[in-house]
Image (tube, grey):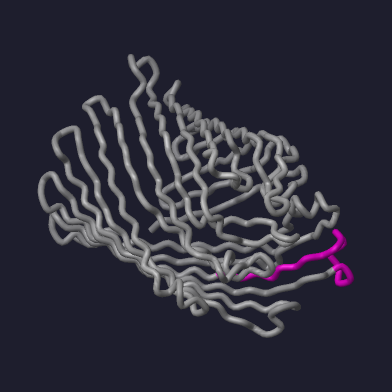
Amino acid sequence: ADLGSWHRIGFDLGLLYNPKRHMPGKINEIVSSSPRYRRYLDLHRWHTYLSHEWTTNSDLVITQSVGLDRSGDRYEEHNSDAYDDSSLTYESWIHTLMTTYNARADWLYSPAGTLSYGLGVEHRWNKRKDNRDYPDWSERKIFLSNTFLFNQYYLNAHWRTGMGLGLSNLWREDSDAENSRLNVEPSIGIYYQNQNGTDIGMSAAQNISHPTMRQLYSLGSGNPELRSQMAWKYEASFRSSLPFGIVPGSYYATAFLNDIADLIDRVRVDGVNTYVNVNKLITYGGECGLRIQPLGFWQCDLDFALLLYDKSSDYRLNNVAQNNVTLTNRFDLMPGMQLRLTSSWNDHRYSNVDRDVYILLPSYWKHDAAINFSRGRYTISAGVENLLDIDFEEEYAYPAAGFNYFIGLRADW
């Protein structure tokens, strides 16, 4: 909503409730012929966000947002698919709460330069109880904070540079060593754009990813000793319109290299799935894609991704395909109504079944369909995943044949 020419506010509210959700068995359990049957009961979540944008003058824009996100569920594990009291082996209840605050200021200090400053804080809390390690309600909480400064400057009509510096910290009540660590995240890039819409860019950045509550404290697989993971990321990209103008569209290509330290991943160690820090991992690869619009109501996207591992890295990411192809078609059926059809092919993937032991999951196709209808402030969406009703394999599961469906309603004020 606009409040005059200087202020704008936004409000978002979301609700989710699922009375029963079954979870498939894990690959290494099926391989060892010891499957467990899992389900969530009374899975619920609601969130609300309030944002404010303040334009003090033509050179300075300040945005702020606050958010509240709350969820909870009851989780069960059984040793048979009867799901009765006699087969129940594990039962837990959990409630979570996340509060956030973010602020950003963008200052156009010259016709060629923009300086941006940002600040973010986040508090995460959960309370859990189960029939094993937590017979009484137990609380956990973590606090994250970050700040950054980024400068973008146009050298001329075609060339621009970007340089930034970020700082972040994760506070945990059970880790003094991590609490005192201040993580530095520098970034630099140079970009070119011509009058025909061709974009070329090269960038390098160090990114920090802190462990989540699930990775730190989940039953069995949680690891309170986890360190934040760090990665140097190098990227070169190219995007341009299709030549000759025969068909409206564009194409792009990106090459990347990731040098990762203390990678957080779920690994099976001594028969137990546990989140651990992997000391070193170097990956590289690329992405390319094509977007065309053969007809005014039809848009088609074809994307390809390739992931490779450096010879110095003997670790393999769980359930990350070496090759991936995605075809997406969007059709404007009528004003306000759009149909989206997606077909994706995922190449073979590695799955860790024990220390330094992997199995290779075969490739599979997956087809989805969704439709959106918008009228005024309201949007109704519905869709079906896995249209062909086929088996396909994921990281910790062999999902059986069957498709998922969803229905949603969104309102904007």
Question: Which residue corresponds to the image point at 19% horizontal and 54% vertical from the top-left?
Answer: 115
Question: Which residue corresponds to the image point at 37% horizontal and 63% vertical from the top-left?
Answer: 183
Q: Which residues are magenta?
A: 71-87
**Total marks drawn?**
0
Q: Quadrant of residue 15?
A: bottom right
Residue closest to the far bottom: 136
Residue 54 visible in the snapshot: yes
Question: Which residue corresponds to the image point at 48% horizontal and 54% vertical from the top-left?
Answer: 261
122 drawn magenta: no
Q: Position of residue 155 (x, y in %)?
A: 15, 39
Residue closest to the far left: 110
On screen, residue 398 versus residue 199, left or right, reads right
On screen, residue 59 versus residue 301, left or right, reads left
Image height of 128 relative to 87, above or below: below
Residue 66 visible in the snapshot: no
Residue closest to the far right: 86
74 drawn magenta: yes
User: Between 35 and 342, which is closer to the camera in this rendering?
Assistant: 35
Say which quadrant the C terminus sits in. Answer: bottom left
User: Between 84 and 162, which is closer to the camera in this rendering?
Assistant: 162
Q: Position of residue 1 (x, y in %)?
A: 31, 59
Q: Quadrant of residue 153?
A: top left
User: Between 85 and 156, which is closer to the camera in this rendering?
Assistant: 156
Image height of 372 relative to 95, above or below: above
Question: Which residue corresponds to the image point at 59% horizontal and 60% vertical from the top-left?
Answer: 276
On screen, residue 343 versus residue 53, left or right, reads right
User: Between 311 and 156, which is closer to the camera in this rendering?
Assistant: 311
On screen, residue 355 versus residue 5, left or right, reads right
Q: Position of residue 30 (x, y in %)?
A: 81, 51
